[in-house]
Amino acid sequence: MTCVICKRGEVRAKKVEAEIKIGNDHLLVTVDAEACTQCGEAYYSADIMRRLEQVREDFVRKAITPPAVGRVYQLT
Ligand SMILES: [Zn+2]
């Protein structure tokens, strides 16, 4: 499949780090997806989209409490 974003790259199966934003928090989830070899655009299947939605819900109601791996800094 050819990438619909850059129209040059080839889309191949790859493990990618999906990012879910919840307020100021960013949740990184490693999932099997497909990514463009040129621009890196990731494509998620319907199953993965559902899984990410589930992870977001679990995180919001604190059913899961993954460790923090970084901090967000803001200059005002
Ligand atoms: Zn692309």
Image (cartoon, rainbow, N blue to C red):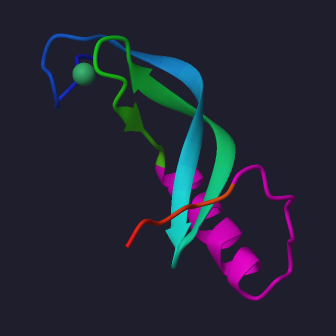
Picture quarter containing residue 4?
top left
Q: Is residue 34 left or right of residue 36?
A: right
Residue bounds of the magenta highlight: 46-70
- Name the image quarter holding the C terminus: bottom left
- Magenta part mainly helix, strand or loop? helix
User: Which one is in front, 25 or 59?
Assistant: 25
**Does residue 63 show up magenta in the picture?**
yes
Dividing the picture into quadrants, the one containing residue 32 is: top right
User: Residue 38 lies in magenta, yes or no?
Assistant: no
Q: Position of residue 37 (x, y in %)?
A: 37, 11
Which part of the image, by quadrant, shows the N terminus?
Answer: top left
Residue sitting at the far bottom: 61
Residue beneath the point at 29% across and 12% down: 38
* Residue at x 53% of width, y 73% of height: 24
Q: Kindly identify the residue that appears in the image at 48 percent across and 53 percent down.
A: 46
Q: Nearer the viewer, residue 15 or 28?
A: 28
Could you say where residue 70 lies in the image, as x and y percent from the top left?
71, 51
Q: Name the quadrant containing residue 72.
A: bottom right
Outermost residue toward the left in this view: 7
Give above or below for 34 relative to 71: above
Where in the image, quadrant-wise, is ligand 1 located? top left
